Image (spheres, rainbow, N blue to C red):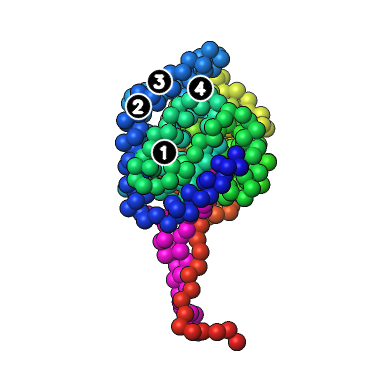
């Protein structure tokens, strides 16, 4: 593991200094290598799938792990599309001149070596490798044991693409062991060779990384997201947004887990929204007022307000106005993604200003919590911390900055 870190650090310097055209050429070559090595990658995936079935994994797990030709083509297309993104390295973020004539520039620079620890989704190997390369970083990738063969085959193809473009293969390295001790070594920082860790997986993995890491972490622990239907909300819009936010994909971190309805529109809005959810096959756990509407509604517990269900379940509550909605989100939320449905522009402005979450939306579904939907091309994850990267972490968020100062002989008195 120590050698892995040293080789990543050496490669990171070369990648950071490589021109954008060369990094983009490598991304195109990596996509081509994924297609050229499709037979090997799919054969490796078939072995991983067979093991997962033998170990009794459920259908949802198998689906996350599965690669077929169409999915692999999509992975290759995603890698190639990263090449088309604007180059984030070397961007002048700000510039100014002091009275003494010194000219200052704040310039985007790569973070260095990024370690990504993930579980069953083998496509993360390609996504993370591509985003790190585009942003001038080296990547150390630690795949879950269930996707180890597939991820290894994908990483080998990515390394082929790097070498074909004249860049060091060590810019993308997959940890060559399933031993869990490797994760501990990464979290210690590999003797200073890891600059940031990104966990992609379940709550237990993220919790361990956040607890044990000695280097910065980009991550979110929970995605307890809310939709608040304000008194001024259009009912048809509120219905469409609520159903999409909850049910489009229930297992993603941007899925809505709680619906808050303003008491001022309860007479017209609450019953249609609850009925629409129930009729769509979503279980509703409600407060007393919500339970009175339909026998299918079960009582919500205190824990339900703070739960990320990741399933066809939603908690529903009446709130006494905007202040109460904001207070509820602050008490029970996870600072991930929240939405307000409102025609009242002033109420929307207050919600967007006062709700302390990484992503806040007005009249749009929480399922837009995705780097691709933000125009980032892709994301390496979503962060809910307050330092540096927040929200979808794309190529720009994988850069830090430095100051360039230009003078003409100034000295300080």
Distance between mark 2 and mark 4 Cα atoms: 22 Å
Which residue matches tag 4?
61
Which residue matches tag 1?
159
Tag in front: 4 or 3: 3
Task: Count neighbours of disc 2 (C-alpha within 10 A) and say few if under 14, some if 14 to 19, many if 20 or more.
Answer: some
The residue positioned 39% from the left and 34% from the top of the image is 157
**Sequence-wise, which precedes: disc 4 or disc 3?**
3
**Sequence-wise, which precedes: disc 2 or disc 1?**
2
Residue 212: quadrant of the picture: top right
Which residue matches tag 3?
43
Tag in front: 2 or 4: 2
**Sequence-wise, which precedes: disc 2 or disc 4?**
2
Helix, strand or loop at mark 3: helix
**Sequence-wise, which precedes: disc 4 or disc 1?**
4
Q: Do labels 4 and 1 touch, CB within 8 Å?
A: no
Residue 55 visible (yes or no): yes
Which mark is on residue 38? 2
Tag in front: 4 or 1: 1
Distance between mark 2 and mark 1 Cα atoms: 15 Å
Tag in front: 1 or 3: 1
Distance between mark 1 and mark 3 Cα atoms: 19 Å
């Amino acid at each position: 593991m120590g050698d892995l870190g040293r080789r990543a650090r050496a490669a990171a310097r070369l990648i950071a200094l490589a021109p954008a055209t060369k990094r983009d050429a490598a991304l195109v070559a990596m996509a081509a290598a994924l297609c050229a090595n499709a037979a090997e990658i799919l054969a490796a995936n078939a072995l991983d799938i067979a093991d997962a079935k033998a170990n009794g994994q459920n259908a949802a797990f198998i689906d996350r792990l599965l690669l077929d030709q169409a999915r692999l083509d999509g992975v290759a297309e995603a890698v190639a599309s990263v090449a088309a993104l604007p180059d984030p390295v070397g961007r002048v973020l700000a510039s100014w001149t002091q009275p003494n004539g010194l000219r200052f520039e704040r310039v985007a620079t790569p973070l260095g070596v990024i370690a990504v620890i993930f579980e069953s989704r083998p496509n993360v190997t390609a996504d993370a490798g591509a985003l790190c390369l585009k942003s001038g970083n080296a990547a150390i990738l630690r795949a879950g044991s269930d996707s180890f063969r597939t991820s290894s085959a994908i990483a080998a193809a990515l390394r082929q693409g790097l070498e074909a473009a004249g860049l060091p293969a060590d810019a993308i390295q997959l940890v060559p062991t399933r031993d869990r001790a490797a994760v501990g070594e990464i979290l210690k920082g590999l003797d200073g060779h890891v600059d940031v860790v990104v966990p992609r997986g379940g709550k237990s993995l993220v919790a361990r990384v956040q607890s044990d890491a000695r280097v910065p972490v980009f991550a979110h622990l929970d995605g307890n997201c809310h939709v608040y239907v304000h008194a001024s909300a259009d009912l048809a819009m509120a219905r469409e947004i609520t159903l999409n936010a909850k049910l489009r994909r229930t297992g993603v971190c941007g899925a809505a887990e709680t619906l808050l309805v303003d008491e001022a529109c309860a007479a017209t809005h609450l019953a249609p929204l609850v009925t629409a959810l129930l009729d769509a096959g979503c279980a509703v756990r409600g407060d007393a007022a919500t339970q009175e509407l339909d026998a299918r509604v079960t009582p919500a517990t205190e824990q339900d307000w703070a739960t990320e269900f990741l399933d066809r379940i939603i908690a529903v509550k009446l709130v006494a106005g905007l202040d109460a909605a904001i207070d509820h989100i602050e008490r029970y939320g996870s600072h991930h993604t929240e939405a307000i449905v409102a025609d009242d522009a002033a109420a929307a402005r207050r919600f967007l200003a006062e709700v302390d979450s990484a992503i806040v939306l007005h009249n749009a579904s929480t399922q837009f919590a995705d780097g691709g939907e933000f125009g980032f091309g892709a994301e390496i994850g979503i962060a809910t911390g307050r330092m540096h990267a927040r929200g979808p972490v794309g190529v720009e968020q994988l850069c830090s900055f430095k100051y360039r100062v230009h003078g003409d002989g100034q000295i300080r008195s």
